[in-house]
């Protein structure tokens, strides 16, 4: 295959998470992002490698046998958020289950029990947090607020009918967009570093029915900013929402990177946090808190993790990459002590507050990099819980974790390819994979969580 040349071929295999391997006969094979097994696709070769090529999808000429559903969302195809809406939820689960099992079968030595996949309680309106971006749908087009267009760094699709969130999100998005467009406020240009509007953050709880809004801008406002912000607050509070608006924040971010961060946060209404309840525990959540984005799905995930963790009576448990301490607090009532380690300081402070909120005095949370912190902890763990970020565990940290020589550990992964890589090291160092279960926390998307139980041989 030649770079820049267009080819047509059949997708004969899926490569996790959302790439099809395309057979083009004598021309060879290519890996094409966004292609599904069974499709016939047209693509352009973007990179040429010795054994295969990488391609950019141009058109699906023939549907896959897996595509048995009509997309519910009107933004499907333009928005880069959901890729699996053309499949029934049953087929989505089968695809994810098969991809996880194939991946782990290649990584795991010997026999292990694969428990399949557990679906999300809700296929639609399940997300409890969204980060929307300001921009334009095409160069110099009208103001847009939503998600990035598929395969685009610059263009934004206004997703005011998104189906993976409650309608409250769509109402807030449309209100904020209309208000800013009416005032002719410019969005922040990522390349020129000019403009004002950057992001809109919305969090909504399921159990407590509370809503938190974060309006993210630069400091480059030309005019009476206070009046503008006050008017925006009133517009949001006037909306007919099913949840109660508990707080509206103005977040100033003058960083050049296209990420959501705060140089200064101003409370313009209410509080800067909301509360959610998971498995009988209460959690205080800010706009920046790490918290599972599918509240009901998180209960399913944590129930499976708790099953794998088993009896922890009289044990000291380390919860590494602990976030806001959800898992640590879940097992604290039946453990001697739980120590959580998390690099994000704000998450650690939230974990400490949440532990007090839930009356738990045997939880300790430490802020810092796992690689460094575990050398400084005096206690030794009887068991380990690992819940690392998408890229998995730093190899040096993983070796230190293995040196604790615990009899059992539970690894929770949001990226099966990272899990597969880390399992190879764990097995080389004397651990056997006993059980694995996939949990779908992200219906209609390519993502899936995996819970893995390992024991020392």
Image: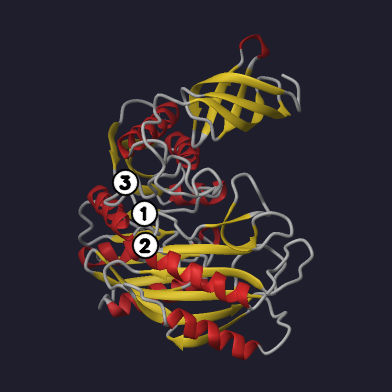
Q: Which residue is mark 3?
A: 407
Give the mark, 2 or 3, whose residue is nearer the N terminus: 2
Q: Secondary structure at mark 2?
A: loop
- Which numbered disc covers residue 385? 1
Give the mark, 3 or 1, whose residue is nearer the N terminus: 1
The reply to whether residue 175 is in sight is yes
Q: In the rendered view, does 22 fall on the left or right side of 409?
A: right
Image coordinates for residue 299, horizontal then vertical, percent: 27, 57
At horizontal 35% and vertical 45% (from top left) the residue drawn is 440
- Which numbered disc covers residue 140? none
Are there few (<14), some (14-19), or many (20+) residues within 10 Å of tag 1? many
Residue that extends furthest to the right in the rendered view of this protein: 192
Disc 2 to disc 3, C-alpha distance: 43 Å
Residue that extends furthest to the top in the rendered view of this protein: 26
Q: In the rendered view, does 290 fall on the left or right side of 455?
A: right
Image quadrant in which the C terminus is located = top left
Tag 3–tag 1 contact (CB < 8 Å): no
At horizontal 48% and vertical 61% (from top left) the residue drawn is 160
* Residue 380 versus residue 121 in the image, above or below: below
Disc 3 to disc 1, C-alpha distance: 12 Å
Q: Image quarter for residue 108?
A: top left
Image quadrant in which the N terminus is located = top right
Are there few (<14), some (14-19), or many (20+) residues within 10 Å of tag 2? some
């Amino acid at each position: 295959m030649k770079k820049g040349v267009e080819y047509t071929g059949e997708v004969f295999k899926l490569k996790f998470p959302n790439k099809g391997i395309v057979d083009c006969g004598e021309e060879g094979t290519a890996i094409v992002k966004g292609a599904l097994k069974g499709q016939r696709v047209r693509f352009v070769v973007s990179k040429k490698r010795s054994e295969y090529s990488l391609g950019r999808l141009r058109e699906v000429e023939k549907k896959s046998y897996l595509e048995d559903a009509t997309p519910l969302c009107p933004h499907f195809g333009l928005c880069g958020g959901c890729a699996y809406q053309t499949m029934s939820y049953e087929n989505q689960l089968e695809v994810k289950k098969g991809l996880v099992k194939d991946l782990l079968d290649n990584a795991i030595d010997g026999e292990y029990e694969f428990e399949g996949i557990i679906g999300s309680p809700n296929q639609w309106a399940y997300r409890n947090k969204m980060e929307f971006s300001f921009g334009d749908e095409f160069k110099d087009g009208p103001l847009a607020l939503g998600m990035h267009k598929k395969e685009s760094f610059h263009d934004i699709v206004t997703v005011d009918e998104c189906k993976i969130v409650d309608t409250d999100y769509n109402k807030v998005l449309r209100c904020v967009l209309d208000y800013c467009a009416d005032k002719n406020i410019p969005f922040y240009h990522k390349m020129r570093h000019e403009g004002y509007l950057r992001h809109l953050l919305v969090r909504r709880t399921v159990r407590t029915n509370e809503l938190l809004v974060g309006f993210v801008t630069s400091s480059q406002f030309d005019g009476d900013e206070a009046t503008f912000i006050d008017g925006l607050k009133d517009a949001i509070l006037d909306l007919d929402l099913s949840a109660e608006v508990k707080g509206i924040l103005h977040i100033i971010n003058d960083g050049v990177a296209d990420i959501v961060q705060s140089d200064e946060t101003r409370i313009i209404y209410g509080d800067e946090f909301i509360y959610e309840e998971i498995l009988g525990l209460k959690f205080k959540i800010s706009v920046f808190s790490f918290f599972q984005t599918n509240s009901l799905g998180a209960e399913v995930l944590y129930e499976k993790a708790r099953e794998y963790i088993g009896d922890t009576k009289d044990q000291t448990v380390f919860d590494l990459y602990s976030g806001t301490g959800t898992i640590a607090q879940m097992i604290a009532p039946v453990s001697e002590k739980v120590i959580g380690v998390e690099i994000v300081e704000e998450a650690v402070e939230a974990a400490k507050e949440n532990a007090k909120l839930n009356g738990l005095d045997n939880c300790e949370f430490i802020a810092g990099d796992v690689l460094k912190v575990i050398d400084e902890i005096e206690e030794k763990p009887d068991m380990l819980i690992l819940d690392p970020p998408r890229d998995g565990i730093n190899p040096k940290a993983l070796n230190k974790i293995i040196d604790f020589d615990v009899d059992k550990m539970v690894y929770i992964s949001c990226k099966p390819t990272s899990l597969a890589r880390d399992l190879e090291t764990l097995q080389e160092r004397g651990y056997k994979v006993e059980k694995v279960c996939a949990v779908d926390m992200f219906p209609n998307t390519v993502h899936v969580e995996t819970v893995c139980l390992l024991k020392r041989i």
